Each structure stands twice: as C-alpha cells, then as structure tokens.
Amino acid sequence: MPLVRIDARSDKSPETLRAISDGVHHALVDAIGIPADDRFQILTTHPAHELVFDEHYLGVERRDVVFVQITLVRGRSDEKRQDLYRRIVRNLEADAGVRPQDVVVTLTENERVDWSVGEGVAQLVP
C-alpha cells in the first residue's frame, strides 16, 4: 500500500492534476505490481513561490516542478525502482504535459508493521 504525496503549482487545471495523479498510480501498478484498487494519494497545490527548487541541480533544467513522494513497504529491486521513475515521467509527460525535467520523485521505504490502514490494526503483518 504505497502512500503518495504529490505537490504541484496551483495554476494547474483540475484535469491536469487528475492526469498527474492517474499517471503516478498507473506507474505504480505497472512497475511494481500494486493492485489497481490500492490507491492512497494526497494531492496538494501551492502558489509558485511555495515550491522551492534548484533550476539547474545536477545539470537538469527545471521550470515547473512536480514533487512526487512515495512511501512504500521495503523490498523492490533497484531495477524496479528505476522502472517506476521512468514510467512516472513517461505518464506525466504523455497525459499531463509535464516536462520530464520537472518531475522529482523520492521513495521512502519502511516495514509492513509500519502501516495501519484503518481500525488501528497493522493489516500487512502476517
């Protein structure tokens, strides 16, 4: 059960924001095999001045960054994580018009016991 936080500028249309949300979710389904109905996202918009980023860090030219933070259970290979990044960028470019240079993705991994998805129970613990 990944938990996804997406931060983007508030001047994006509701349709673009939905396409960003969908693109991230579809990448998670395709790259790491989460179930299609396993969708938990927090989408937050900000005025441009609230999204601070280096426009040239590591030689990438950024203009309108979309931050994607994904918290998920530990255990995916480096190859699967890199495939996830590629799929997110591809989906956001194709479906939401977001430039690949403007997509920043971070993963935070934890253990199954670190999740309760309701009722005060750690449902992912066998």
Image (cartoon, rainbow, N blue to C red):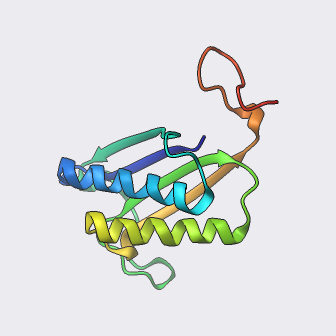
Q: Residue at x 51, y 62 (%)?
A: 105
Q: What is the x, y in percent for residue 12?
A: 20, 54
Near-viewer residue (73 or 38): 38
Q: Quadrant of the C terminus?
A: top right
Residue at the far front: name it. 36
Residue at the far bottom: name it. 59
Q: Residue at x 53, y 40 (%)?
A: 38
Compared with 125, 104 (above or below) is: below
Q: What is the x, y in percent for residue 36?
A: 50, 46
Viewed as shown, does residue 73 lie left or right of 27?
right
Viewed as shown, does residue 117 lie left or right of 99?
right
Q: Residue at x 58, y 71 (%)?
A: 83
Q: What is the x, y in percent for residue 97?
A: 26, 69
Near-viewer residue (29 or 104): 29
Q: What is the x, y in percent for residue 22?
A: 37, 52
Residue at the far right: name it. 126
Give the number of marks: 0
Compared with 50, 62 (above or below) is: below
Near-viewer residue (8 or 98): 98
Quadrant of the rendered structure where residue 82 is? Answer: bottom right
Q: Quadrant of the N terminus?
A: top right
